[in-house]
Image (cartoon, rainbow, N blue to C red):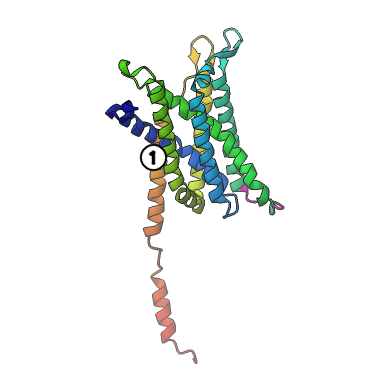
Amino acid sequence: MDILFTPNALLALLTLTFLEIILGIDNIVFLSIVSGKLNTEDQPKARRIGLLLAMVFRIILLFGITWVLSLQDTLFSIDLGAFFQAHVTGQSLIIFGGGLFLLYKSVSEIHHKLEGEEEGTTGKASNSLSKAIIQIALLNIVFSFDSILTAVGMVSMKEPIEGGFGYEGALIIMILSVVISIIIMMVFAGPVSKFVNEHPTIQILGLSFLILIGVMLLAEGSHLAHFRFGNDVEVTSIPKGYLYFSIFFSLFVEFLNLRMKKTKKPVKLHNNKIIDKDLTNTDITD
């Protein structure tokens, strides 16, 4: 336990916590959009359940880290000669399937918001909470895999004498980072969801982010499965830094637009004052 209070361990904890929060942005956006379709009294419950599920899935995967790493083994191979080759793993199937689900959900939500409510959809709010929780749980599994694999790649599980934290020390650091990040996200999930649901442009922007993340998951799943077209073209993963930079830059531009809309004064026609003055000076009896 003494190694947890070393500067390296504290730095690793802070770094992992910050990373978990950054990786959880897509989770909060998805929660905001899914919970926004529920009744007002059910929205906080859906957000709490969603974030608690995220924490539980991550901790379970951390305790089963050996099983998670075993999913890197090849399940089956596809060899179509020089045209296409692949070595599919368990991790690639989960992440690829999650990308497909996220793409489907994002595109269908954008279509739903553009087309509007269909007739006869009222009265289904009682079942929507359970459906929302199922959708949140399915996507949390994918987000949890992505988050845990990133965390394992950053924390050394070597023995302390070799410069690492050891298996138990690394496990405790990762669990603490998950718990702290989920608590922070719970605090800010409500205000973020309220802000997203009150601004239609932010909702469309958030759904567009989910499409980008879905494409990233498809590319990452294809990379883990070693998709190869021809002899030289192999699918590579999209660096997360590029993705999150585009997200933050788009949000920054949208915040500037919202700021300008609030501070911009409405256009006033100067002719109105002249007309009003002429009307007041006109003798109505004439």
The picture places residue 36, in percent across and down from the top left corner, at 56, 49
Residue 211 visible (yes or no): no
| Left or right: 143 in relation to 80 | left
Q: Residue at point 57% right, 16% down?
A: 88
Q: Residue at point 34% right, 34% down?
A: 14
The picture places residue 241, in percent across and down from the top left corner, at 39, 30
Indicate the amino acid at tag 1.
Phe
The residue positioned farthest toward the top in the image shown: 81
The residue positioned farthest toward the bottom in the image shown: 285
Residue 275 visible (yes or no): yes
Q: Residue at point 43% right, 24% down?
A: 152
Compared to residue 220, the image places residue 232 above or below, namely above
Residue 118 on the magenta segment: yes
Q: Secondary structure at mark 1?
A: helix
Main secondary structure type of the part rendered in magenta? loop
Residue 128 on the magenta segment: no
The residue positioned farthest toward the front in the image shown: 1
The residue positioned farthest toward the left in the image shown: 7
**Nearer to me, 272 or 104:** 104
| Left or right: 244 in relation to 82 | left
**Nearer to me, 235 or 260:** 235
**Nearer to me, 60 or 134:** 60
Compared to residue 129, the image places residue 283 above or below, namely below
**Nearer to me, 231 or 137:** 137
The picture places residue 142, in percent across and down from the top left corner, at 54, 30
Q: Residue at point 35% right, 27% down?
A: 1
Mark 1 crowdedness (10 Å alpha carbons): few <14, some 14-19, many ≥20: few
Determine which residue is flagged by label 1.
249
Read off the magenta span: 115-120
The picture places residue 258, in percent across and down from the top left corner, at 41, 52
